[in-house]
């Protein structure tokens, strides 16, 4: 069973509302010209925004700017399909700029559009309010939809805790062919993180020489290939740690690492704590939402 995307009022060019289920082939590492507000409704996993890789949970709210690559990957411990995992709004950057030209009082909102070029997470934004704003946009049409959207942008601009995600403003290359081939490799790594994946294999998958692939992968993702693979594996290990009672050694191998010492070294480098410490912290801070998948 694979939940399908729901698209509402596709005739609206400046604002488009969508819902995604999970799993879905539509959820992949990609970029598009529109800005995007993205609310996680259910599950936990890893957020990939530009060169940023971090955790997400239900209630988290993000904004991505034009052509900034992004993806949200639910941890594999969530085995049951989700009818609705994401609520999102895609909108034209140019339309908001034109609105600010006509109404100068609205110009302050352009600040978050500038910030969104690197991706934003609105930390601490009330998830009930966020969902309410999304539903208002979903359930309205025409001018009322525009008003609901503008009201949401104003509230987001006023919100104090805005976390910038990507150190680099990664822009999709003209034409997108190089981006698409690197994207195929990224999706392959995410789906097959347990397997041994060499630079040579990845280069072949992308149809590039190793030197060209390594240069392009760094430019598109902000990470070297081996570093990226390790980050994905550590991210998957985090999900296994908070959601299971498996021994750390077993999780090390399930995440694709060959030995415990290497796993511990990379984990400490990326998370600033040991796997056992992460498990204890995550269960205290994150476990309550594990019971909610709707």
Image (cartoon, rainbow, N blue to C red):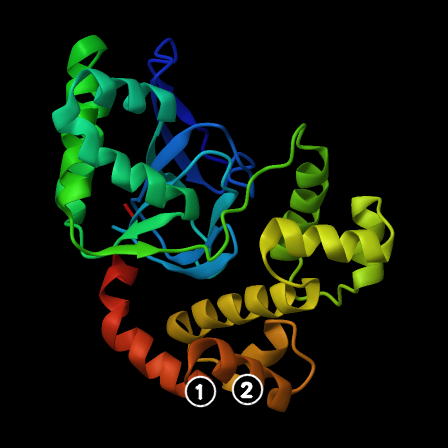
Q: Quadrant of residue 93?
A: top left
Residue 193 position, x and y percent, is 64, 62
Residue 105 appears in the figure: yes
Residue at the image point whose x is 21% and y is 18% from the top: 146
Residue 208 left/right relative to 226: right
Residue 256 position, x and y percent, is 65, 72
Residue 55 left/right relative to 144: right
Q: Is residue 40 above or below residue 214?
A: above
Residue at the image point whose x is 42% and y is 58% from the top: 45
Q: Which residue is mark 2?
A: 264
Task: Say which of 113 and 80 sits in front.
Answer: 113
Helix, strand or loop under label 2: helix
Residue 288 left/right relative to 31: left
Residue 92 appears in the figure: no
Q: Is residue 285 above or below residue 250?
A: above
Q: Which residue is mark 1?
A: 274
Residue lying at the far bottom in this picture: please name it. Answer: 261
Q: Is residue 255 above or below residue 138?
A: below
Q: Quadrant of residue 106?
A: top left
Q: Is residue 16 above or below residue 281?
A: above
Residue at the image point whose x is 31% and y is 52% from the top: 121
Residue 169 position, x and y percent, is 49, 47
Contact (CB < 8 A) between labels 1 and 2?
yes
Q: Quadrant of residue 166?
A: bottom left
Residue 188 position, x and y percent, is 68, 51
Number of residues whose C-alpha sits closer than 10 Å to that of mark 1, classed few (under 14), some (14–19) or many (20 or more): some
Residue at the image point whose x is 22% and y is 12% from the top: 141
The number of numbered discs placed on residues in the rendered structure image is: 2
Helix, strand or loop under label 1: loop
Task: Say which of 51 and 251 sits in front.
Answer: 51
What is the C-alpha distance between the residues marked 1 and 2? 7 Å
């Amino acid at each position: 069973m694979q939940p399908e995307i729901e698209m509402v009022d596709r005739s609206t060019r400046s604002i488009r509302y969508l819902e995604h289920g999970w799993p879905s082939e539509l959820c992949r590492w990609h970029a598009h010209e529109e800005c995007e507000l993205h609310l996680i409704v259910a599950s936990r996993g890893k957020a990939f925004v530009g060169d940023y890789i971090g955790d997400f949970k239900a209630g988290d709210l993000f904004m991505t700017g034009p052509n900034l690559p992004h993806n949200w990957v639910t941890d594999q411990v969530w085995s049951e399909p989700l009818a609705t995992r994401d609520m999102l709004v895609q909108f034209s950057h140019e339309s908001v700029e034109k609105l600010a030209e006509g109404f100068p009082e609205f110009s302050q909102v352009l600040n978050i559009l500038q910030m969104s070029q690197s991706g934003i997470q609105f930390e601490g934004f009330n998830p009930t309010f966020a969902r309410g704003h999304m539903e208002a946009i979903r359930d309205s049409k025409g001018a009322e939809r525009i008003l609901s959207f503008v009201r949401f942008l104003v509230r987001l601009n006023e919100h104090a805790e805005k976390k910038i995600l990507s150190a680099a403003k990664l822009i999709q290359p003209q034409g997108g062919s190089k981006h698409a081939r690197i994207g195929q490799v990224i999706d392959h790594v995410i789906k097959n993180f347990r397997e041994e994946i060499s630079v040579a294999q990845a280069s072949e998958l992308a149809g590039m020489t190793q030197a060209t692939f390594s240069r392009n992968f760094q430019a598109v993702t902000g990470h070297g290939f081996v570093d990226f693979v390790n980050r994905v594996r550590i991210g998957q290990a985090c999900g296994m740690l908070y959601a299971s009672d498996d021994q750390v050694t077993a999780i090390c191998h399930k995440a694709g690492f060959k030995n415990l010492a290497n796993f511990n070294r990379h984990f400490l480098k990326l998370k600033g704590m040991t796997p056992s410490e992460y498990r204890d912290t995550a269960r205290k801070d994150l476990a309550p939402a594990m019971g909610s998948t709707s």
